[in-house]
Amino acid sequence: MAQKEYDFKCLNCGREYRALYDIKNVTERTCPQCRSNSVRRMPEKKGAAKT
């Protein structure tokens, strides 16, 4: 599987969280706090250390 962890942000309540994302199996994401579907993937930080 091509799953990778990404940072997401809810545009409704502002919560930021990390979740697995499979680019080949695109499904609608929902915020774990407010259940809004207005969730966007955050851009990766330049120079961030990979763990």
Image (spheres, rainbow, N blue to C red):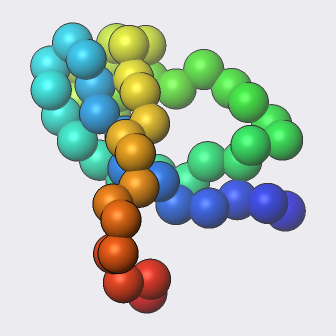
Please identify the quarter of the rendering in which residue 24 is found: top right
**Residue 48: x %, y % from top left:** 33, 75
The residue drawn where x is 68% and y is 26% is: 27
Is residue 33 shown above or below 46?
Answer: above
Please identify the quarter of the rendering in which residue 47 is found: bottom left
The residue drawn where x is 74% and y is 43% is: 23
- Lateral position of residue 39 relative to residue 16, left or right: right
The residue drawn where x is 23% and y is 41% is: 16
Is residue 6 shown above or below 24?
Answer: below
* Residue lying farthest to the front in this orientation: 46
Task: Name the quadrant of the C terminus.
Answer: bottom left
**Residue 43: x %, y % from top left:** 40, 45
The residue drawn where x is 47% and y is 54% is: 6
Is residue 5 shown above or below 51?
Answer: above
Q: Nearer the viewer, residue 15 or 35?
A: 15
Please identify the quarter of the rendering in which residue 45 is found: bottom left
**Residue 44: x %, y % from top left:** 41, 55
**Residue 26: x %, y % from top left:** 73, 30
Q: Nearer the viewer, residue 1 or 41?
A: 41
Is residue 45 shown above or below 34?
Answer: below
Numbered-mark total: 0
Task: Name the quadrant of the N terminus.
Answer: bottom right
